[in-house]
Image (spheres, grey):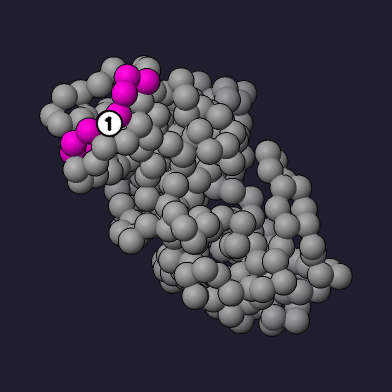
Amino acid sequence: MIFPTKKFRYCNIQQLTNEGMDTTLSNEQIIERIEEASKLINRITDQWFYPIETTFKFREMRSSVLTLPNFIPIIELNKLIVEESELDIDEFNSDIINDVNNISQRIIESYNGDFSGKIEATGVFGYIERKEKIETVTSGIISSGTTNVNVINANGFQKNDVLIFVDGNNKLKVICNSVDKDTNKLYFGDVDINDVEISSGAKVYRYGQIPTLINKACKILVLRNLYLLSSDEIEEQDITSRLISETTDKYSYKLSSDSESSSGLSTGITYVDNLLLEFMPPPLIRGV
């Protein structure tokens, strides 16, 4: 599948530091490794784990149910066009607000007969946890090296949220490290020289958080890449007695004894491969 953006970062430098990272690499070099690990996770799962605004285009079809490639979850549906006619979107959003593992969040169902012809679905898509849309406005600027920003109202924002800053055509996505609700300040990191500058008065959104297990997998891959942990040490620190199942936030998962993904790719770390199995679509609905 073709992914709608080149930059994915499923963990950040602060989170790696909290895990004991000690390296002479620059922040830019560490960010490169975070992006490399995140891309690998995307390739193996054939999913993405950010709220991404994009448009899916479908060829001629006739069906009462529209499924997105690989059942990419629908976070927010903003526009649905069938044969150049825009449909009433409120009719569909009510059916896609359920839990992330519920199939109704991954399909668009027509109430008025079949979808017919060419279709375009525009919205926010991605596999996230703690889904809730909250927005505010910045009262400070963000530039290279910035690690926090004041906002008009920080209520509802949480640690580990994916923060989306929108300033005209400029957009920035970062992981929230902490929230100070008394001063209405959001703390984050990893704004490097290649990121855009965000001015005061820009909009700030949160749709949810990167899944806990994806964040964990990314941290392990980056630390392994930095030679901070051997595979034996990873198993001692993160698995202890071979993890079979675990419950997190709003879903549970069970690890398979076969670590090879249906994509045929592997991270080279059995534990991480097993974590990623939870997020892969069944073979029969994989996209092309």
Residue for point 38% across, 35% down:
65
* Residue shown at the point (67%, 73%) measured from the top left: 258
Q: Quadrant of residue 223?
A: bottom right
Position in image of residue 24 (x %, y %): 54, 76
Q: Position of residue 45 (x, y in %)?
A: 49, 61
Q: Considering depth in this image, is 63 or 141 the residue closer to the camera?
A: 63
Horizontal side of residue 263 vs 233, given as left or right = left
Report whether 31 appears left or right of 83. right
Residue situated in front as seen by the camera: 105 or 35: 105
Principal SS element in the magenta part? strand
Residue extending farthest right = 241
Q: Secondary structure at mark 1?
A: strand
Tell me if mark 1 has few (under 14), some (14-19) or many (20+) residues whose alpha carbon lies within 10 angstroms of its own: many
Q: Is residue 112 magenta?
A: yes
Residue placed most toward the observer, 257 or 147: 257
Q: Mark 1 = which residue?
A: 115
Quadrant location of the N terminus? bottom left
Residue at 50% x, 21% y is 153
Pick whichever, 142 or 130, lies toward us. Answer: 130
In the image, is 216 to the left or to the right of 61?
right
Question: Where in the figure is residue 9, as x and y percent of width and height?
Answer: 46, 57
Residue at (40% x, 29% y) in the render = 109
Residue range of the region highlighted in magenta in the rendering: 111-121
Magenta segment: does it hold 178? no
Q: Eyeballing the image, is 274 above or below 86?
A: below
Q: Amino acid at mark 1?
A: Phe
